[in-house]
Image (cartoon, rainbow, N blue to C red):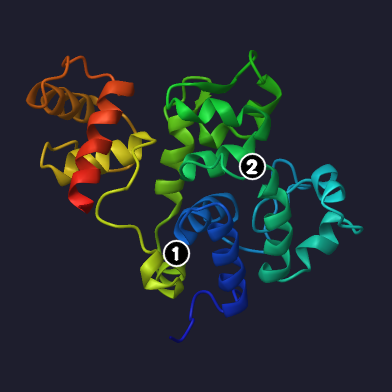
């Protein structure tokens, strides 16, 4: 296809993206979504708040040095997307077997030391003037509900919010059709996944955007009541397990 909006992203870059995804048992579209949220999938991108965070996966100088890159962040931004993604493969290698969802991919990119916290959408990764407060100042845009905290679910919501427009649609179309997400996820690891399941089973969660709200809570309670679970509106282990059992039955 003619790449009108993604001419800066070579076919080889998408091949490297696929290699990265296969190493971790994920879909390329999941990594693409995280990188698009971070940089618009641009090798030239840098964080306007912290200009040292650079490139497709917004890597900082100390991390770059640890990956064996000898130049400056400006020199890193001069590399092509495919060259930068080779460093992304090195960056994510320590997390083999731990990237259970696109949210885990994002947390590994954003705050890798807190990767284990990605299992719970409500976990707080940073709070203004509190836990990991130094992170909050440079990343206020992730705080979707403006409550002074960055929670795991908000990373998922940021991906959903960012992944739209002509450039994203063209990028998605260039990724192998086999890697386009199915109608429902195979695993339910995030608010976004949960909403997709509720929407698939016609419980009316409202917008499937990764943002929990009254409609999502009501839909979840209806689902729980219908499945014989305690209708508390909490996306906990029993509800997640029930959803994944049903998804497993669909695949049989």
Does 237 appear above or below 73? above
Q: Residues within 10 Å of mark 1 (few under 14, many from 20)?
A: some
1 vs 2, front mark: 2
- Percent across and percent down for residue 204 are 13, 38
Mark carried by residue 150: none
Q: Secondary structure at mark 1?
A: helix
Mark carried by residue 95: 2
Q: Are marks 1 and 2 in contact (CB under 8 Å)?
A: no
Identified at 65% across, 58% down, the residue is 56
Taking the image as drawn, is residue 159 in sight?
Answer: yes
The residue most toward the left is 226
Image quarter hosting the N terminus: bottom left
Tell which of 74 and 199 is nearer to you.
199
Identified at 17% across, 14% down, the residue is 230
Mark carried by residue 168: 1
Taking the image as drawn, is residue 44 in sight?
Answer: no
| Among the two numbered marks 1 and 2 on one chain, the one whose residue lies closer to the N terminus | 2
- Percent across and percent down for residue 246 are 19, 39
Q: Is residue 164 left or right of residue 243?
A: right
Q: Is residue 33 left or right of residue 191?
A: right
- Percent across and percent down for residue 147 are 47, 20
Q: Is residue 18 left or right of residue 181?
A: right
Identified at 46% across, 43% down, the residue is 101
Residue 224's quadrant in the figure? top left
The residue most toward the bottom is 2
Q: Secondary structure at mark 2?
A: helix
- Percent across and percent down for residue 93 are 68, 49
Q: Is residue 102 left or right of residue 92?
A: left
Does 120 appear above or below 27? above
Q: Residues within 10 Å of mark 2 (few under 14, many from 20)?
A: some
Distance, label 1 to label 2, CA atoms, is 26 Å
């Amino acid at each position: 296809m003619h790449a009108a909006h993604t001419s800066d992203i070579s076919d080889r870059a998408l091949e490297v993206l696929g290699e990265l995804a296969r190493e971790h048992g994920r879909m390329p579209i999941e990594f693409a979504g995280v990188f698009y949220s971070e940089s618009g999938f641009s090798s030239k991108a840098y964080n306007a708040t912290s200009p040292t965070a650079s490139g497709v996966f917004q890597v900082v100088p100390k991390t770059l040095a640890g990956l064996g890159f000898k130049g400056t962040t400006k020199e890193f931004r001069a590399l092509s997307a495919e060259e930068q993604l080779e460093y992304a493969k090195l960056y994510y290698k320590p997390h083999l077997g731990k990237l259970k969802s696109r949210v885990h991919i994002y947390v590994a990119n954003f705050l890798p030391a807190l990767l284990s916290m990605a299992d719970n959408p409500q976990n707080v990764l940073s709070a203004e003037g509190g836990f990991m407060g130094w992170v909050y100042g440079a990343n206020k845009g992730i705080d979707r509900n403006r409550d002074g905290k960055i929670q795991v679910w908000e990373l998922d919501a940021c991906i959903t919010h960012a992944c739209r427009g002509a450039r994203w649609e063209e990028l998605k179309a260039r990724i192998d059709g086999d890697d386009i997400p199915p109608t429902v996820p195979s695993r339910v690891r995030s608010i976004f996944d949960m909403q997709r399941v509720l929407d698939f089973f016609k419980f009316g969660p409202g917008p499937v955007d990764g943002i929990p709200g009254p409609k999502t809570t009501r839909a979840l309670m209806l689902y729980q009541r219908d499945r014989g679970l305690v209708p508390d509106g909490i996306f906990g282990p029993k509800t997640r397990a029930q959803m994944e059992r049903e998804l497993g039955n669909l695949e049989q």
